[in-house]
Amino acid sequence: MDQPLETLTQALLDAASKAGAEAADAMAVDGTSLNIEVRGGALEQAERSEGVDVGLRVMLGQRQACVSASDLSPQTFVEMAERAVAMAREAPEDPGVAQAGPGEFATEWDVEGLELVDASDEPAPAELEQAAREAEAAALGVEGISRVDTVGSGYGRRRVHIATSAGFAGGYARSESSLYAVAITGEGTDMERDYYGDSRVFRADLDSADTVGRTAAERTIARRGAVKPPTGAYPVLFDERISSSLMAHLLVAINGNAIVRGASWLRDAMGEQVLPTGLSLTEQPLRARCQASRPFDAEGLPTGDRAIVRDGVLERWVLDLATARKLGLESTANAARGTSAPPSPSVTNVALTQGTASREALLAQMGTGLLVTSMIGATINPTTGDYSRGASGFWVENGEIVYPVNECTIAGNLREMLKSLVPANDARTHLSRVVPSLLVEGLTLAGQ
């Protein structure tokens, strides 16, 4: 692409002004992605994509409209602006339509300090293929693995630039490298599978291909002979690899869109206990080498570390300007957007207070119950918090894993579940969501 992204966003704003927009903001995104998959020692799939997308939002009073395109010609920008203004004139009024003012914008940020981009050269396809082959070979080298379903290696790089008619302009880039493997043991109805993968900003930080393949295989072998667990009320330990799903349910419930609609089981919980005393959930958008980090949100507001839940008490909603305005509050700098839609609230990195006990210590504390390592499907009532999910993992007796289990359902109520959490100390700190294994008391299991 010959034109810098900041040139594109300014050209869109100029076109919007000429078309009669009272206010506007523009977004330009370019990116490259490369993905390789191997199977049976041979190249299965290779994909590469490159592209630039631009988006324009125009505002006329309390009306707004969004348009996007991948054609970067000046005439396209004129047509985009004219179409957006025409659409906005016909759009219904929305009391949340707003744009940040000059005194609210981020003015200084340290993109280099965030370390969001791997400065090394883009890996060659042959390098990605070799990593995938090595991971597959490592998995197949574990006794009992019948085949490797999928092994993938990928790389991506993306740049974003945002500008508004009120005077904000800023951008940043990010990169991502990944490697994963899915292994299978057994045949037919006795088949079991599991996976392992790693994703990092810096390719040098990735787990080795041997580690990825071997870990996927070892997890799969541990699942051989899985049966349904007994039915009843038992404690459940959510393994670290899936425990963040519990925090995800909490974050959905405090999202400004849900609160505005009144469709949240936490809609009346501001200032109340939602986690056990001593536990805090903190947003950390400026954490270095983390894929969800960002120096400002999609409306140009400065980001920073802030508690969502402090010492068990809910302190804030997750808001952009629109939801904040509807609730009579201030934005929490959580706006996110793509090129074809207006901003909406979304969190970046979060971290839950870690405990002092290991996962093994929590298993011993649990005594008899279920260790969940994988989940499928979800039935979550957004207004009551009633929770039901398919699960698999391992049955635990006397604090020890005794056999693998599958085809079971765990059920409870999220409000009560979250208040009973006991965290382990095993969270991986490089992830966007740093959440350790979590022990939850008194869930209902439906198995045999």
Image (cartoon, rainbow, N blue to C red):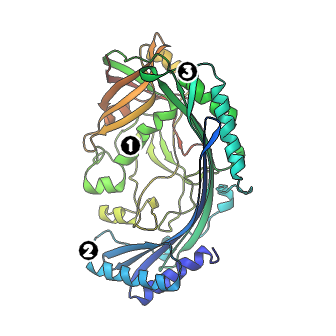
Secondary structure type for disc 2: loop
- Residue pointed to by mark 2: 93
- Residue pointed to by mark 1: 250
Q: CA distance from mark 3 to mark 2?
A: 58 Å
Residue 138 as seen in the image, left or right of residue 59: right
Residue at (55%, 21%) from the top-left corner?
Answer: 221
Residue 214 as seen in the image, left or right of residue 106: right
Residue sticking out furthest to the top: 398
Q: CA distance from mark 1 to mark 3?
A: 33 Å
Q: CA distance from mark 1 to mark 2?
A: 31 Å
Total marks in image? 3
Amino acid type, callout 2: Glu
The answer to which image quadrant residue 430 occupies is top right
Let me know if residue 159 appears in the view.
Answer: no
Let me know if residue 194 appears in the view.
Answer: yes
Amino acid type, callout 1: Leu
Q: Residues within 10 Å of mark 2 (few under 14, many from 20)?
A: some
